[in-house]
Image (spheres, rainbow, N blue to C red):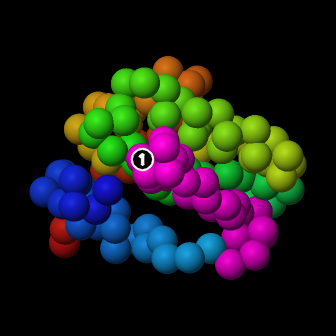
Amino acid sequence: MRNNNAGARGAEAFFAEQPIGFLVGADAGFSLVAEVDSVIVGYITVLLTQVLTDRIATVARVYVTARARRVGVGDALITFAKNTAREQKCSRIDALALPGDRDTKNLYERNGITARLIVATTKL
């Protein structure tokens, strides 16, 4: 994902502010790797946080290889994330996407995850 989005608007800040290494413990979040014929074709990483009385799931990373796109792998990853978030008693699921990353935004919107906040910024 990082290499595919390296030159994208906002990518540098996104990866600096959302560093994802390994999730340790069920309270931190969860990840799923998608395989086809024992070949990894995608993954999703979801962070779990507590905001006041609400438990929130946030899709921090979702990626599907180019050859595995448009056949339902991304949709299956999102479905897994939503179902697991429900099991973890989350009240909502948020998802992060870079500006201009229409494929990721389409994936989210197709799965009922719509924009509720846009963060605008400028360097000072």
Q: Magenta stretch? A: 24-50
Q: Position of residue 25 (x, y in %)?
A: 75, 75
Identity, as a three-letter code, of the amino acid under mark 1: Val
Q: Position of residue 121 (x, y in %)?
A: 28, 57
The residue lying toward the viewer, choosing from 49 and 81, is 81
Residue that extends furthest to the left in the rendered view of this protein: 7
Q: Position of residue 66 (x, y in %)?
A: 27, 39
Q: Position of residue 102 (x, y in %)?
A: 29, 31
User: Is 90 situated above or below 104?
Assistant: below
Q: Residue 75: tell me if it is visible.
A: yes
Q: Residue at x 58, y 33 (%)?
A: 76
Q: Quadrant of residue 27?
A: bottom right
Does the magenta portion include 35? yes
User: Is 50 situated above or below 44?
Assistant: below
Q: Residue at x 78, y 68 (%)?
A: 26
User: Is 52 situated above or below 19?
Assistant: above
Side of 37 relative to 77 (left or right): left
Q: How many marks?
A: 1
* Image quadrant containing the C terminus: bottom left
Q: Which residue is mark 1?
A: 41
Residue that extends furthest to the front in the rendered view of this protein: 37
Side of 56 relative to 47 (left or right): right
Q: Residue at x 76, y 46 (%)?
A: 84
Q: Residue 95: tell me if it is visible.
A: no
Side of 56 relative to 101 (left or right): right
Q: Secondary structure at mark 1?
A: strand
Q: Residue at x 33, y 44 (%)?
A: 65
How packed mark 1 is, by other alpha carbons closer than 10 Å (few <14, some 14-19, many 20 or more), is some
The residue lying toward the viewer, choosing from 11 and 63, is 63
Does the magenta portion include 96? no
Q: Main secondary structure of the magenta part?
A: strand
